[in-house]
Image (cartoon, helix red, strand yellow):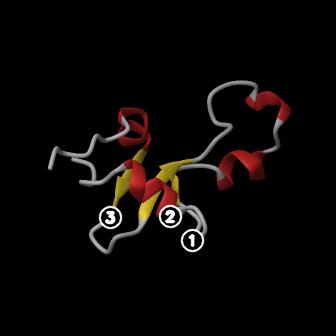
Amino acid sequence: MPKMKTKKAAAKRFKITATGKIKHGVAGKRHRLISHNAKYIRQNRGTTLVAEADKPRVKSWLPYGTK
């Protein structure tokens, strides 16, 4: 059987933790932050986990995980 291909865009955007959860960056942090209040900017700092409903789809994009 040939190897499955990894979606390279997904490999750049998601990381799989040691326990199998999937981390991703939060949207809305790049520009136009002056129109958002401090609470929005503070809460969107760092990374968050992918929702349980989206996990199977993201894992199908990363058949061998990420490095």
Q: Position of residue 12 (x, y in %)?
A: 38, 37
Q: Secondary structure at mark 3?
A: loop
Q: Position of residue 44 (x, y in %)?
A: 64, 50
For residue 35, above or below residue 23: above
Q: Position of residue 31 (x, y in %)?
A: 68, 24
- Residue 15 relative to residue 46: left or right: left
Disc on the earlier residue, 3 or 1: 3
User: As drawn, which residue projects farthest toward the top?
Assistant: 31
Using the image as rendered, state which of residue 58 and residue 15 is in the foreground.
Answer: 58
Marks 3 and 2 sit apart, C-alpha to C-alpha, by: 13 Å
Label 2 close to label 1 by CB (< 8 Å): yes
In the drawing, what numbered circle is on residue 17?
3
The residue wearing badge 2 is 55
Using the image as rendered, state which of residue 6 and residue 51 is in the foreground.
Answer: 6
Foreground mark, 3 or 1?
1
In the drawing, what numbered circle is on residue 52?
1
Kindly identify the amino acid type of the residue bearing the numbered disc 2. Lys
User: As drawn, which residue projects farthest toward the bottom?
Assistant: 19
In the drawing, what numbered circle is on residue 12?
none
Marks 2 and 1 sit apart, C-alpha to C-alpha, by: 5 Å
For residue 37, above or below residue 57: above
